[in-house]
Image (cartoon, grey):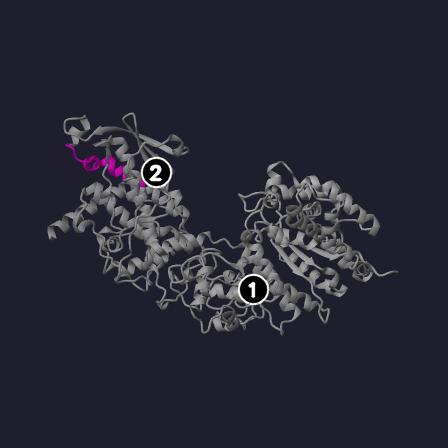
Amino acid sequence: MFNYGSVLHQPYESAYATIRRALVSNPGRKLHRLKNVLQLPNTSDTLNKWLRQQQSMPKDDIPGPMTPTRQCPECAAACFHTNLYTLRWLNACPIHGCAFRYSCAICGRPWPKLSELEKRDCHGCGIPSKDDFLTYTLPLARKMNTTELEVVYSLWKVSGKLCLPNLRERFDYCYDLNPRLMWVVADEVDELYPSLVDHLMPSNVVRVKQATYRGLYCKEANLHPLDEDAGPLANLTHGYPLIKRVRPNQDALHDIYLVFKGISQWLFRVSDHRACYINDYRNLTTSRLSTSYRICPICSALSVWLFHASFRENLNVSTGSTESFPILYNHGMDRFLSLGRPQVYFRGEYFTYDEPFSRWLYRRSLMILFIDLFKFFQLLANIQRKLMRTEPFTVSRMSHHVIRKCGLSIHKGKLRFLYHLRDPLTAISPPHSIQTSMACKAFHDNNAARLFNPYLYLRVNKNNLCTLTEFLDYQNSLTENFILMCKKT
Amino acid sequence: MANNSSVYSHPIFRPRQMPITTPAMTLVRDELTRCVWTHQTGVIITGQSRAGKTSACRQIKRCPILNRDGASVPVLYVSIRHRDKPTIKSVFRQLCLSSDLKISDRDNSDTLCRLYFHHILDRIHSSPSPNVLLLVDEFQRLSPDQFDAFAELYDVSEEGDIDLTTAFIGNDPECRGLIEKLESDEFAHIYGRFFGHWIAFTGLVSEQQVASCLRQYDTLRYPDDGPSYTGFFLPQAVKEGWRFESLAPDLWRIFSEYRSAARITSWGMQSFTSTINTLLSDVLPHCGVENHSDEHIHECIRISGLLPGLVKPKD
C-alpha cells in the first residue's frame, strides 16, 4: 500500500498530476517503485487503471501530453495540472487568473517530464521538501477551487473544435490584454450563440408559478388570435407576424437611434475607446482577416449591428447579399432577428401581440443582438490567429445568462414576458481588454481599400456622439448605396 | 442448541469479535471523544494486563468515535514491539508498517515521518474535520527517547493544520517506571504534551457491572435475526423465562472470594469472558440452569486462567 495524496487531488487533474501527487505523498519512493508496488511489470494497464480510478474523468477524455508544455505556476505549486490547460483558446488559468508559463516560476527550468519529476526538489514543479510542502503546497492545495474548470470542461465538451491541443503556437506574440480579463472574455463569448434566439423564442409557453419568477421584471402584452377573422390587429396584418408589418418610419429610426446611442454611450463609458469606426463588414471572412491587424470587437460588433438594424428597419430587407455576413455565417452566428417571429402558440392556436410590446421586445432584442455580436467578435479577436480556418465552430444551443431567467406565461388572455435584467448590457463583462483606438484605426485603414465600402463609413467619437441628424443622413447614404447595389445586380 | 456445524461459528467461540461492551470500554470511548472534541494532544490509558484495553482499541477502530460534526474520526492503531535498538526510526517504521505502507531499509526517520504524515493526510482527506486519533498500544515497550517520534509527528500535523490526538495504552504496573522517567525535567515536553490526561482502565469491579455484561448475552443475537446468545445455547431455559443476568449475584459472590484472597481489584475481561463462555457453552447446557452449583462456577473461573495469573513469587 502507498499513499495516494488524496489531499492534493482535484477534479479534472491530468495523469501527470496524479502521478506527481503520488510521488509527493510517498517521499523516498521512486517512480519505478510505485510501479512495482502496483505490480506493474512494465507500465501495464494496472497503472492506467489506477489513474482512471484516481482521476475524476476518463483518462482519455481530454488528450494531453504526459509532459505539460504550459502550466499555471500557482496550480503547479499545488501539485495540480489538467489537460484543459492545453486548450489554446484558454489564455490564463481559470482558477488563479495567472498567465500560463512554459517554465517553472521558482526554479526557471522547463516543466519536468515524468521521469524527471523525482529528481526535482523544487516546490514549484517537482517534489517539495517537508517544509515546503507544509508551507506552500498543502495550503495552496486546500485553497484550490476548481469550480471554474467545470465551465471550461463543459465548453470544451460542447465546442471541441475550439481545442487545438496539437497546434504549434505559431503566433506566440504577447497579448496586450489583461490575462484575467481574457479569461472572462473567453468564458462569456462561448455562451453567446443562441441567446438571441432564446430571448425571442423562450421555451414553450407554460403556466409558471409566480414564485419562480419572483424578483423578475414583467412586461404585459395583449394577445390577439392570429386569425383573419379574429381581432382587429390580425386583420390589419393579414395574419402575418406583426414585426414584419412594422413599416420603417421616422419613429422607428428614432428608436434605433436611441438604442444605438445607448450602446455607444455604454461602450465609451466602460472601455477606453475614444472613437468607433463603423463600416461594412459584409466582405470580411475568416481567411481574409489580416494577420497583422487585429479586429476590434467594439467597432466590428457595432458596425454589423448597425447594418442589420438599418437594413431591417430602414430598408426592410433581410435576405440576399445585402445582409450576408460570411464571417458570421461560417461560424454559426447567422441568426439575426429574422428568427424572432412575434407569435405565440398556445393551446392549439397562434396569437400575436400588440404593437407597443412588439416594438419594446424588438428594441430589447436589438440590444441582445449587439451583445451576441460583441461577444462573437471578442472571441474572434482572441483567437484571430489561432482559429481553425477549415472548419466552422460547432454551434450548440446553450443558455446565456442574459436570458436565463426569461420566460413567457399567459394569464387571463394576456402575455407576460418575464425577464431578469432591465438593461441587458449590464450582464456582460466590461470590455477593458479591447485594443486601443489607434489599433482600430490601423485595422480600418488597412482594410479600407480591399474590404470596406467607403460610402458606408461612419466615425463615432466619444466626445461627439452621432446626432440624430447625422444618423438620419447616414441612413440615407445607406439607402442610396443599397439602390446602387440593386442597380448593379 | 443449534446443530454442530453452526455452533462453532458463534461469536462466543471467537472472543475477539464479541461485541460485549464493558463499562470501562464505554469510559474509554467517552474520554477519548472528549479529548478529540477538546483538541487534546495526548492521553494515556493504563490498566492491568488482560483487562480488555486492546479490545477497547479494537472496538474504537471498528466503530470510530465521532467528532462534533458527527463524522467518524480516522483512527490509526499501532502496537509497539520490542526491537533490538530502541530508536526513533524504529517507531516510525512500526507506524508505517502498522498501516501497511511499503518501506525500505534505507529510509531514514525523516522520510518515514513524512510518509506516515502523508498517510494521515490521506486518511483525513475524506473527513470533514481535521481530527485524527492515533492509538499506541503497549507503550510500556517504548524508551523515553522514542516518544520524540510522536512529538515530531504531532508537530508536523500541527503545521499541516491537523488535530492529532495520541492515546498511549499500556500495562500497569509495567509502565510505571517509564512514566516516572518521563516525569523528569528532561522529558517535560513529552510529559506535558501527552500525559496530561490519565484514564485508569479496569476490569469489572461490581456486581452491577457483571450484570450489565450478562445482560448483553441476553440481548445480543446471533445471527442477527436469530436467538440471543443465551437462547442459542439454552433455548429451553430462555423459553421458560430464565435469563443469564440472574447469575450475576452468584458470579460476583464467588469471584469476590478470589478477590479478597488474592487482593485483586477487578475482574479482567479476558478471564471474565472465558468464564462466562465456558459456563454458557459447556457447563449450563449439560447440567441445566436449575442444577448448576457454585462448584461449576469455581471450575469455570479456574479454567479461565484467573488463578495462575494471580500467582506471584514470594517477596
Q: Are marks 2 and 1 in contact (CB under 8 Å)?
A: no
- Camera-side residue: A210 or B235? B235
Residues at discs 2 and 1 both on one chain: yes
Q: Secondary structure at mark 1?
A: helix
Q: Secondary structure at mark 2?
A: loop
Please indicate whether residue B294 sits to the left or right of residue B128 in the image: right
Asked if B307 appears above or below A128 in the picture, the reply is above
* Left or right: A454, with B155 as reference point: left
First in sequence: mark 2 or mark 1? 1
Image quadrant assignment for residue B208: top right
Residue B227, relative to residue A28: is it above or below? Answer: above
Residue displayed at 72% across by 71% down:
B85
Any part of residue A473 in sight: no
Chain identifier of the residue bearing label 2 in the image: A
A23 magenta-colored = no
Instruction: Give, as a single range, the part of the protein colored magenta.
Output: A238-260
Q: For label 1, count other residues whose C-alpha is less than 10 Å away and answer few (under 14), some (14-19) or many (20+).
A: many
Q: Position of residue A2 (x, y in %)?
A: 55, 65
The x, y position of residue A420, in whole percent, is 38, 37
Q: Is residue A81 left or right of residue B233?
A: left
Q: Is residue A295 above or below residue B276?
A: below
Q: Residue at x 74, y 42 (%)?
A: B250
**Image point (19%, 26%), residue name:** A231
Q: Position of residue A323 (x, y in %)?
A: 20, 49
The chain that hosts pointer 1 is A
Disc marking residue A25: 1
**Cα distance, mark 2 to mark 1?**
49 Å
